[in-house]
Amino acid sequence: MADAHETRVVEYGDGPDRVRIVVARANVRRGMIRTRLKAEAQQAGETDPDLLILRWITYPDLTASAIEVDGLEWPMSFDQFLDLPEPLCIDWEAAAYDLNPHWIPTPPDEADVKNAPAPSTAA
């Protein structure tokens, strides 16, 4: 397990509904889990833009960052992930990106967008 400087604990709720997630700085295995989940997301054929972002970015980043989970079914499916309380996911996401800033999604550079080839209209 990573040392205390490489983890954050996220807690949500009380009593029997308490959730505790230990989030870690990525190692090669965590990075590969994230990569695999992103590859699976590409093959899911999602058409809803909100679900696409959640499936392609949020779900892989958060689940790959977790090294210990108490109070939730684990491993967790994408559909189970969608039912989590938003405040829990906000804290989890903050911890994941604090420890793994190289995972933070960035919008395309404006210059890249301007220089991108025009979409083909050929049939």
Image (cartoon, helix red, strand yellow):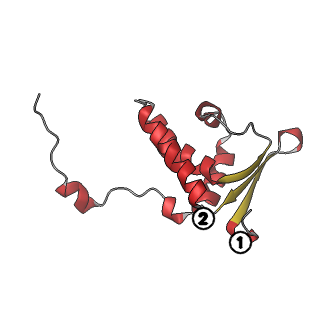
Please name the residue shown 67% across and 52% down the image: 66
Q: Is residue 20 left or right of residue 23?
A: right
Residue 65 can be seen, yes or no: yes
Q: Is residue 98 left or right of residue 10?
A: left
Which of the two labelled residues, at mark 2 and mark 1, occupies the earlier sequence position? 1
As drawn, the residue found furthest toward the left would be: 122
Q: Position of residue 94 (x, y in %)?
A: 61, 58
Please name the residue shown 50% across and 39% down the image: 55
Task: State whether residue 123 is above or below residue 116.
Answer: above
- In terms of secondary structure, where does tag 2 sit? helix
| Residue ID for mark 2 | 98
Please name the residue shown 69% across and 47% down the image: 88
**Which is more foreground, mark 2 or mark 1?**
1
Name which residue type carries label 1.
Answer: His
User: Which picture quadrant has residue 99?
Assistant: bottom right
Quarter that holds the C terminus? top left
Q: Position of residue 81 (x, y in %)?
A: 63, 37
- In terms of secondary structure, where does tag 1 sit? helix
120 or 38, nearer to the observer: 38
Please name the residue shown 72% across and 39% down the image: 74
24 or 54, nearer to the observer: 24
Quarter that holds the N terminus? bottom right
Q: Position of residue 84 (x, y in %)?
A: 67, 38
What is the spatial separation of the Cα atoms under label 2 and label 1, in whole angstroms? 12 Å
117 or 16, nearer to the observer: 117
- Pointer 2 local density, CA inside 10 Å: few below 14, some 14–19, many at least 20: some
Q: Position of residue 39 (x, y in %)?
A: 45, 42
Q: Is residue 2 left or right of residue 117?
A: right
| Residue ID for mark 1 | 5
Q: Is residue 16 left or right of residue 52?
A: right
15 or 56, nearer to the observer: 56
Residue 53 can be seen, yes or no: no
